Amino acid sequence: MTIRAISFDMWDTLVDDDSDEKIRAERGLPSKREERRHLVWRALNEIEPTDYERVALAYDTADAGFNLVWKKLHINWTLEQRLRVVLDGLGRTLPADAYQNLVDETARMEVEIPPNPIDGVALSLEALSRDYKLCVVSDSIVTPGTGLRQILDGHGLKQYFSAFAFSDEVGRSKPHSSMFDTAADALGVERHEIIHVGDRDQNDVKGPHAIGARAVLFTATRPDDADITTADAICASHQDLPGVIARVVQKAEAEGAAA
């Protein structure tokens, strides 16, 4: 059995999720959660006086709906859809240009103040890209795939990837097979020729295992699932990742030869 490709989750695998919150605080900016609600309030309040607490409640309710659909049904609402749900909950609309501006401002937040790359990520990607095709397979949550590409590019990481499967573009979220199928098709490899690397056992281990791929649980910034995982291996740092991948590949080849 030959391994030809490595796919990567983005959040807490390539970049340190919410590390941008510290940067925002140091600059005297509100949290992302607060700023997203403020942007909706400001857009509506410019048209007619609007109560901020009602906006915050509508946003909280929309977030709860998103999380239910995302985690239980593995369907990804786009940012445009999420904001429509907020406005619908308030019984309000915005002119097309104002609505598009709201979407764009929300989408730019993590691009303008991006999360930090995880230590050693560039070196591990460079090393792995010599022998394997690399792909990002990641849920987009708020920032759309276009913005996530910009974040990776800003950190000098986008160059190592030949394909991307972002949930807002695929229409489903991990662990749904569509995410991994999209990656395999884009890379031109079979599902069993992929090793996926990510930090969540349900999404990044159970998902690839279900389509016959291998999986490495990455625990550098989020070790929560280390004690429950069924991953083929656990890796605690990017410095160790090429070696961990080599051992998983060796095991896959041995199992293939014995079959």
Image: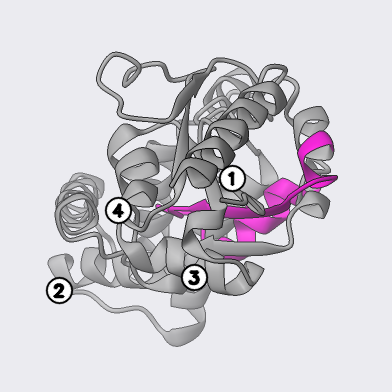
Frontmost of labels 3 and 4 is 4
84 relative to 71, above or below: below
Which residue type does callout 1 highlight? Glu
Horizontal side of residue 94 vs 68, given as left or right:
right
Residue position marked by numbered label 1 in the rendering: 110
Q: Is residue 79 above or below residue 224?
A: below
Amino acid type at image mark 3: Thr
Answer whether labels 3 and 1 touch (C-beta < 8 Å).
no
The residue pinned by badge 4 equals 210
* Above or below, comparing residue 185 to residue 235 in the picture: below
Quadrant housing residue 237 = top right
Q: Does residue 104 appear in this view?
A: no
Give the spatial CA distance, label 2 vs label 1: 28 Å
Residue 190 percent location from the top left of the image? 53, 66
Q: Amino acid at mark 2?
A: Gly
Q: Which residue is mark 2?
A: 91
